[in-house]
Image (spheres, rainbow, N blue to C red):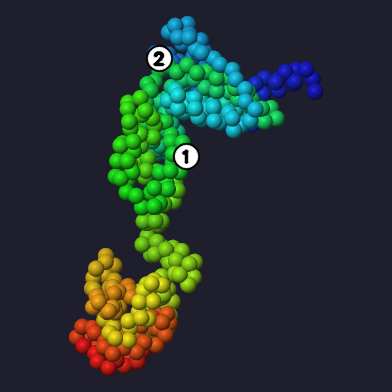
Amino acid sequence: MSEINLNKRKRNDEKKKCSLCNSMFSNIGNRNKHMQKAHGVDNRTNVCLVKCPLCEADFKTLTNVCEHISNKHNVQLIKESTAFDSLHEFKTWKRNIEKEDLFFFVVQKLVGNKTYYVYYRSGSSRTTGSGKRMKWSQTFKTGKIYPAGMTTTNVDGHITVEFRRTHVGHTLNMKFLPLSKEERDELAGKIKSGVTFERILDDIRKSVTSTESVNRFHAVDKRNLHNIKRDYDLDRDIVHTNDAFTTEIWVQEQMLLKEKSPVAYFKMQGCEKEGPLLKDDFMIVIMTPYQINVLSKYATDRICVDSTHGTTSHDFQLTTLLVVDEFGAGCPVAFCLSNRIDTVAMSRFFLSVKEKVDLITTKVLMSDDTSTYINAWSNIMSNPDYSC
């Protein structure tokens, strides 16, 4: 290859290289996209978006911004160097620095064995969506480039750090700091155990002993708790926006409990015909192990059956099976949620109960004045001595 061609190829390669971080790309278009997203520089219009955080002046590189801040604003930018024997030691040090200075650093890029960290409000937000109408995602980014940052070099597990510690152009605000993993784990544990958001927030506020002791954890709000609930998959109410899918997922989870599962029977609406139930029928029968024991103990004396009508948005009906204990108190021992109450549906309900406790012989069956319950009971169980 001639010297002319070599020089031409070298010039083309230089055009594909990012002038800010020396990253190489397959074409100029990809380089331009990288420089706009990673560094805020739009080469396509020759508009420089790297702004001074103090006066809005435009620059092409972070180095130019730092020189400008030092020369024009008389701000001394402190640089520190340190080293660590392991990545764990570095991360511990980084967390302590962030708590001390009330700032947080995120990885901007990885180049070989070097990792570049920047202040996480540095740069511009990115659009989401496609087509002509783009949406801006909610962000804490300011559109400016800040001099503070870190560059680490990893050599066989040993970490050296070049740290630009000086922060300019933004205020100290704890709400912009993320919670640590330990803090998020602690809050997730409380949410999982059923502690309300109001109680969690009250306890956090009461833990403040003085203004000097206030830290990021004390600034937790409901938005943080909702994000933790989502990220840790603790919100069972929004497993799926469709009630049918949510119910089916819950039933599948309960069935994993095997003999301890409270689901005695389940028929999803829209599934194929199953026994006497039709395709459009829905039924779920709930009996906990405790309810099974209570039913077995008191069923021989009295059985009570009652239903409520139209209590859900789906117009399903709840049927409850009760027994009376030695103190004369009614004890619910089985629940059936179904789309209809007739002899066919109630027969399937009582069959599910029978499959749990075998044949029930009772003296008295108490229900309303309809014959639905007595007919269904007689079809599945033995006839009671009395019905009323």
Residue 125: quadrant of the picture: top left
Q: Nearer the viewer, residue 205 or 5?
A: 205
Farthest residue in the front direction?
327
Residue 117, image x, y percentages: 54, 26
Q: Can residue 319 be seen from the camera position used here? A: no
Residue 285, image x, y percentages: 37, 74
Q: Is residue 135 above or below residue 171?
A: below
Q: Residue at x 58, y 28 (%)?
A: 90
119 horizontally vs 292: left or right:
right
Residue 378: quadrant of the picture: bottom left
Q: Nearer the viewer, residue 53 or 371?
A: 371
Farthest residue in the left direction?
369
Q: Which residue is mark 2?
A: 54
Rounded to the nearest whole Å, what is the CA distance between mark 1 and mark 2? 35 Å
Quadrant for the N terminus, please: top right
Q: Residue at x 67, y 31 (%)?
A: 157
For marks 1 and 2, the one nearer the N-term is: 2
Residue 203, image x, y percentages: 32, 41
Q: Is residue 342 above or below residue 31?
A: below
Q: Is residue 306 above or below residue 64?
A: below
Q: Residue at x 72, y 18 (%)?
A: 7
Secondary structure category for the residue under label 1: helix
Residue 110, image x, y percentages: 60, 30
Question: Which amino acid does the dot numbered 1 rest on?
Answer: Glu
Quadrant for the C terminus, please: bottom left
Q: Which residue is mark 1?
A: 182
Q: Is residue 64 above or below residue 351?
A: above
Secondary structure category for the residue under label 2: loop
Q: Nearer the viewer, residue 52 or 354?
A: 354
Q: Nearer the viewer, mark 1 or mark 2?
A: 1
